[in-house]
Each structure stands twice: as C-alpha cells, then as structure tokens.
Image (cartoon, rainbow, N blue to C red):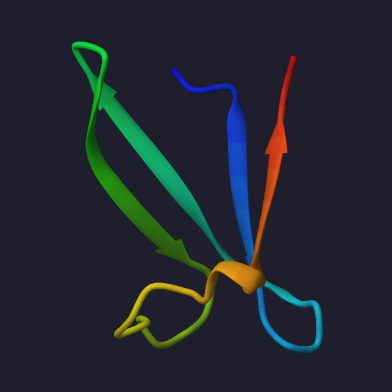
C-alpha cells in the first residue's frame, strides 16, 4: 500500500475524483482514476488539479 492520496479538484476547488496507484511486487502496476461526477472523464487530470497528501 502507498500511504498517499491524489485528490482531483476542478477549477472551482470541488472534489471530482481521485488517483489511485496500484503496486505489484515493488513496481507500479496500474493507475486508476476514480471519478465522482456523473460523466466519466476521457483524459487524465492536469497535474495542477491533483493534490497529493502523504500519510505518515
């Protein structure tokens, strides 16, 4: 497990999704974009729209 979250917010600051990293045998195996809106996104979010928080 990676102790971090990647919250995705729109230009108004509303939370619209999150990025999840999946690791298998010590290597990144998948990147998942979970969205909270009615319509699925067609592209990954701009890095400026992602806030990463690391848990200790």
Q: Position of residue 49 (x, y in %)?
A: 64, 72
17 lies left or right of 14: left
Relative to residue 52, is residue 33 depicted above or below? below
Question: At 38% across and 60% down in the image, what residue appears?
Answer: 33
Q: Is 56 positioned to the left or the right of 37 in the image?
A: right
- Please tell me how many numbered marks the rendered image carries: 0
Location of the N terminus by quadrant is top left
Residue located at (46% from left, 85% from top) = 38
Taking 33 as reference, is 30 above or below it? above
The C terminus is located in which quarter?
top right
User: Looking at the rendering, which quadrant does residue 14 occupy?
Assistant: bottom right
* Residue sitting at the far right: 12
Q: In the depicted view, which residue is nearer to us: 35 or 5?
A: 5
**Above or below: residue 56 compared with residue 49:** above
- Is 26 on the left-hand or right-hand side of 9? left
Looking at the picture, how far across and down is residue 35, in whole percent?
47, 68
Residue at screen point 38% across, 73% down: 44
Q: Position of residue 2 (x, y in %)?
A: 49, 23
């Amino acid at each position: 497990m990676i102790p971090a979250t990647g919250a995705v917010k729109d230009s108004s600051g509303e939370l619209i999704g999150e990025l999840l990293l999946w690791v298998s045998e010590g290597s990144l195996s998948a990147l998942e974009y979970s969205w909270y809106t009615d319509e699925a996104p067609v592209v990954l979010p701009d890095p400026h729209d992602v806030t990463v928080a690391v848990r200790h």
